[in-house]
Image: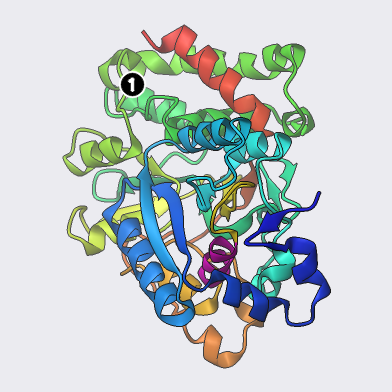
Amino acid sequence: MTLMAAGLSVNAFAADTSASEKLLQAARGQTVYFNAWGGSDVINRYIQWAGQQVLARFGVRVEHVKVTDTADVVRRVRSERAAGKQDGSVDLVWINGENFLAMKREALLYGPLNAWLTNYPLVDTLGKPTTTIDFAEPVNGMEVPWGMAQLTFMVDSQRVASPPQNSTELMAFAKANPGRVTYPRPPDFHGTTFLKQLLVELNPSRSALYEAATPQALDRFTSPVWAYLDALHPHLWRNGRQFPPTAAAQRQMMADGELLFAMTFNPNEAANEIAANRMAASVVSYQFRTGTIGNTHFVAVPINAKAKEGGIVLADFLLSPQAQARKADIAVWGDPTVLDVAALPAAQRALFTASTLPGQVRSPANAIPEPHGSWVAPLQASWTQRYGT
């Protein structure tokens, strides 16, 4: 497929030894509409900083289009493409999982991009395999890794001496502390991730979870999840008849003393909250010893983006050691890097300052790859049918 951008094809860039210079020249003066979740002031400020850097260095303007659901962005790109709109409204999108799967399968993404990313060779593709596999779907250069995430739990060590370390212990913990445990309501991302954690943990033979879901596989592998939740819910906050709408709401309930347990997908979130005086310094973060669901989040350029070159330039800057180190800084965002820090030159490695702040995960567990993206929608639908009154 020949992909056109500002009169220059991707193949033309690739064939020319000065590809990066041509890309930067084409990008200068463009405005990139970066569609990214806007629900965090910390992240919004980071994106604003990145936009300032890209404007100063490359002459590319960045407009942060704050979205609440990336699926809405996918639908917009799909509609624009169906209408033949070549100068689409989305130039870069923060994406992963089922949304990436949909865009890749429907040929809604521009790429592959790796050949135009000067910082891509710095990515730790071996130590962090989810940088190349997104919800069991090969990335193939159609999206650019941006940050790492892993399901992480939080408790206040002054109130919880021995946090639960697996689903069996969580059940016992909930029974011993009725009404003090819950999880976010699916389809909230964190609530769905908790369901996926149960899915992989309660099915030791899990290879089928990394293939496209079939009705037979869904029945077989989700049955232990529903049996577990049927037994768990009566002991939860409000007897499992209501659930916090978001992980942020659950975290606030824990900070207020209403709950003993909360979850996040950022291993540094508790440290961020403690630093901002929103959580007690006695809060600790941890992951189940046998591992928790982990993934990489990405950015991608839609097939009909108006500012394709500008989108690639922004994506490449977001991969730079400077941008990755700033993003990993607890004081800025605290989002783990996708780079192989140990392999960086000393000056760049020094940007990633090690810290042992209160609230950080002290003993990281193995990251369990996400199930195939096709499992998400039926898992959410079944939960809603069973419990979402």
Vertical comparison of 275 with 291: above or below: below
Residue at 51 percent of width and 60 percent of height: 363
Q: Is residue 114 left or right of residue 167?
A: right
State the extent of the magenta-drawn residues as a range: 309-318
Q: Is residue 105 left or right of residue 152?
A: right
Task: Give the quadrant of residue 121.
Answer: bottom right
Question: Magenta region's main secondary structure?
Answer: helix
Q: Which class describes the residues within 10 Å of circle 1: few (<14), some (14-19), or many (20+)?
A: many
Q: What is the three-letter code of the residue carrying label 1?
A: Leu
Residue at 64 percent of width and 45 percent of height: 368
Instruction: Indicate how the structure is coloured in the image.
Output: rainbow
Q: Position of residue 94 (x, y in %)?
A: 50, 50
Q: Nearer the viewer, residue 282 or 217?
A: 217
**Residue 378 falls within the magenta-colored stretch:** no
Vertical comparison of 16 with 360: above or below: below
Q: Nearer the viewer, residue 389 or 93?
A: 93
Q: Could one spot residue 44 in this view of the protein? A: yes
**Residue 317 falls within the magenta-colored stretch:** yes
Q: Which residue is mark 1?
A: 236
The C terminus: image quadrant: top left
Residue at 41 percent of width and 63 percent of height: 62
